[in-house]
Structure formats: structure tokens, C-alpha cells
Image: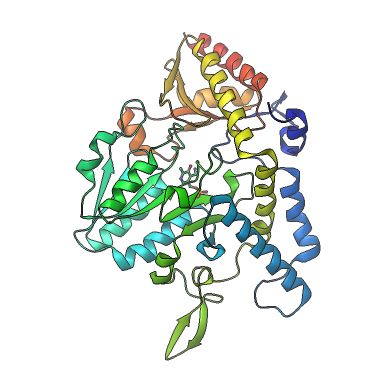
Amino acid sequence: MDFDIEQLRNRFPILHQEVNGKQLVYLDNAATTQKPDTVIRALTGYYEKDNANIHRGAHTLAARATDYFEETRKAVQRFIGAREAEEIIFTKGTTESINLVAATFGRKFIQSGDEILVSGLEHHSNIVPWQLLCQEKGATLRVIPVLDSGELDMDRLDEVLSEKTKLVSVVHVSNALGTINPVEEIIAKAHAVGAKVLLDGAQSTSHLEVDVKELDCDFLAFSAHKLYGPTGVGVLYGRRELLEIMPPYQGGGEMIKEVDFAGTTYNEIPFKFEAGTPNIGDVIAFRQALRFIDEVGKAAIKKQEDHLLRYAISRLSEIKGFIPVGTARNRVSVLSFLINRVHPFDVGMMLDASGIAVRTGHHCTQPLMKRLGLEGTVRASFSVYNTKSEIDRLAESLERIAKRKN
Ligand code: PMP
């Protein structure tokens, strides 16, 4: 291990509590990660010392809050390797970032007869906005099929991608199974037919190095709360050339240059897409989350998470009745499974009684569950602050659950 795990865990106050009489084991990191002390302090510090509305004020607090807010934008730019800070738009989450692209790029550039391509691994937030758009425009939604292993059937990409495809919107890493998709190949092939590409980075940005220049994607959407940051903050990265020709998203203050009843002109990017008062305090605190990732190091985080995943797979595989769901070799620290025929929800409740937090159900991926012939799974997802002894606790509880129902 490249860091002192106890010191690192001490930075997460929430981990140090008992749940149902047992020390908490938090294994629901794909839903949301916990927050380090510096993020929590930045939030309270903002409201204690700096709270003011940004961009317009002549006074010192407004200038300070504006500086801090814009510093986060620059930190996000560095975090994903964007060329310019203006290519970073703050939203309230991945969901809103995707909806923004559907409502602006989609409304302007998708026409009747066009096709939008997603994959069978998508979260509902990368399906429904495109269905709504397709209904409105008379366009067609197509799907890259999924193999039994939980990987995309790349041999069939050419069947669903064509000159008709105007946008490919795919998940970089599956939240339900942890599969890392071969997005480089998808992006290259999509560009070859003239389609733009949106990556849903909700699960990839927390585990992998994500560089938008290297990936050559056109849009990237992700959420701060899955990256040790606060809820209510999302990011949409878009290439400048595209953002400039896209119409605004919502109308209101901040997004305008000049308003007249005869007509309104719009602000420059990114402000054109940020109508109204944004989530200032949470955006400012998000900066500390990115600093935390920098301090620990993406490589060290990945190494620790890979180590935990490998340990969990081997430890849980010893349990009679353990059925892994999704066996992709290329994956992040997410483990979906079933225990015998025990309903995933019951497994979740029994684990909770032992102080262990996992997620159960369809993970907002109903089409994927249908494809796999399942109603849902139990999902344990590991973060940098998890330990092998926590996985032992999970395994011991699962052993008891498996025996009880046999
Ligand atoms: N896509 C994926 C792959 C996700 O895991 C999630 C969150 N579960 C989302 C999109 C939606 O993110 P949010 O709820 O933060 O908008």
C-alpha cells in the first residue's frame, strides 16, 4: 500500500460509527463516496466566511466566492485534461449533464431519421433523455448489445453504427457490474462515421485516469458526489467548437449578455449554460475533493481498489452459493453477485443488520438486468478507504446468509 490506511480513514469521520451495534462497513461507494474532512470543512468554512453570490458583486465577499468557484473550474479542467476551463460547465449531476446535451445539442442537431447509439450497459439517465429526444424528433435509439460476461459485444458494433448515427452516448464504466468499456475504439469508430460521442463518466472518473484529450470524446458527464465531493454538483465537459454552436439550456440570469424585449443575446461559454445562482458552496468544496485525489494519487487509489477487488473475488468465491454477475476482466472495484436464491433485497437487509452497507436491486439499469435474466443483484463497491478486514466481515456475513437458506 502506498499510503497509511489508518491515517486516510481518519480523514473520513462518517466511517467511525456503529450501525446496528456493529462497526460500519461502507461498501456502497458506486452509489456515492464518503467525504474527507477537508471537503466537510470547506463547506462549513464557505458559509462561515465567504458566502456571497458570485460573478456580479462589487464587494469583497462576492469577489472571494467568485475566485474560489472559478478555481474549482480550473481544477476540474486539469483533472480531466480539458484544453480550457471554459469547456467545463457546472450542473447538478451526471443526469443533468446528459439532459443538457439532449436538450441543446440534441434539439438542434438531431433530426427525423437520425440515430442515437447507446449501449446495453447504460444507467437509466443515459437512456431516458435519448428516448424523450427520439420521440420528439422521430429519431431512433439503437443499442450496442451486451455479452453474458457483462462486456459489450464489440463484434456487433458495426451493425448498430452507421452514417445515420449522429450521437453515440455510452457509459465508460458500468455502475452495475464494473465493466470498463473499450471507449477508445467506440470513439474512433463513431468519429469515422461523423457521429459525436458523449461519455458517461459517473463511474470512471473515480477509478481511472480520464483525459478528454487522449480519449478524444466530445462530451464527458460526471458527478462530484462519486468523487469524494458534495452532492448537487455535476460536470459537463464539452469541446469548445460544439458548446459554441449549441443553443442555451435554461434561460435566466447569468446566461445572457443583453436582454431586451426585442431579443436577447447570450453570454460566452461556460456561462451560457449556467443560468441562475449555481450551487456555489458545494462547487467550492468539490475543489478539496479533487485535492484529496491528487494527494493520494490516482495510481495509488487504483492500486488499492484493484487489490481489494481481487481479494473480494477470491474470498467470496469460497462461499458455497456465491454467484458473481459480470465477469469482465477489465473492470473497476465493483462486485455484483447473488447468494443462492436469496432475494438481493433480503441479502442487503441481513448485511445491514451486521453494519454492512451494500446496494441491492436493478441499480438503475433495468434493460441490463433484463438482458441477464435477473431482477437485480447485490452490489459491493470498494473505495480507497476500504480494507481487507472489511471484506472479511462481508464474507463472514454472506457465509451465514448462504447457510441459512440452504
Ligand atoms: N450514470 C452512471 C453510470 C451512474 O452510476 C450514475 C449514478 N448512479 C449516474 C449516471 C447518475 O448520476 P447522478 O445521479 O449523480 O446524476
Q: List x then y, in percent, for residue 356.
A: 62, 26
Classify residue 377 by image quadrant.
Answer: top left
Classify residue 180 by image quadrant.
Answer: top left
Q: List x then y, in percent, for residue 334.
A: 51, 30
User: Does residue 110 sit above or below 10 in this rendering?
Assistant: below
Q: List x then y, in percent, for residue 265.
A: 46, 83
**Quarter the N terminus occupies:** top right
In the image shown, does 203 or 269 lie closer to the viewer? 269
Measuring 52% from the left and 75% from the top, which residue is drawn there?
255
User: Does residue 55 sit above or below 369 in this rendering?
Assistant: below
Q: List x then y, in percent, for residue 250.
A: 46, 70
Q: Residue furthest right?
A: 49
Q: How many marks?
A: 0
Q: Is residue 308 left or right of residue 53?
A: left
Measuring 76% from the left and 61% from the top, which residue is drawn there?
47
Classify residue 401 by image quadrant.
Answer: top right
In the image shown, does 156 or 367 lie closer to the viewer? 156
Measuring 25% from the left and 34% from the top, which residue is drawn there?
155
Can residue 357 be seen here? The reply is: no
Task: Name the image colouring.
Answer: rainbow
User: Does residue 405 sit above or below 61 in this rendering?
Assistant: above
Q: Is residue 316 left or right of residue 368?
A: right
User: Does residue 148 sit above or below 172 in this rendering?
Assistant: above
Measuring 70% from the left and 63% from the top, which residue is drawn there?
68
Q: Is residue 235 left or right of residue 163?
A: right
Can residue 47 be seen here? The reply is: yes
